[in-house]
Image: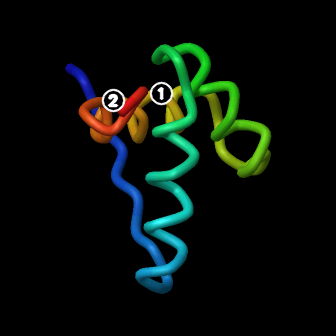
Amino acid sequence: MYVKYFAWFKSKHERTEFIKLLNSAKSDIDAINKVMQKYPELSLSEVSGIVDNFKKEINK
C-alpha cells in the first residue's frame, strides 16, 4: 500500500512560497532536500509524498 501525503497551507502566500521553493529545485531530490530544510519537523516519507504531489512544479 502506498500512502500519499498532502500539504495544507495557512494562506495563499504560504502556498506561493512553497511553489517558489519547488520551482528553484533542479530535481526531485533537490526539492526534497529544500523542503526538509524549511520544514525539519516533517519526516522523509512525508516530504517525499508532498513533493511527489507537486512534481509538476519542480524546475519550472
What residue type is disc 2 on?
A: Asp
The residue nearer to you, when weighing 10 against 2, is 10
Cβ–Cβ below 8 Å for labels 1 and 2? yes
Amino acid type, mark 1: Ser
Please indicate whether residue 48 sits to the left or right of residue 40 in the image: left
Residue 12's disc is none
Give the residue at x 70% y 37%.
36
Which SS class for mark 1?
helix
In the drawing, does residue 56 fall left or right of residue 18? left
Per the image, the residue denoted by label 1 is: 48
Which quadrant holds the C terminus? top left
Q: Is residue 44 above or below residue 5?
A: above
How far apart are the alpha carbons under marks 1 and 2? 6 Å
Q: Determine whether the residue tagged by mark 2 lies in a helix, strand or loop.
A: helix
- According to the picture, the residue beneath numbered tag 2 turns out to be 52
Residue toward you, 37 or 26:
26
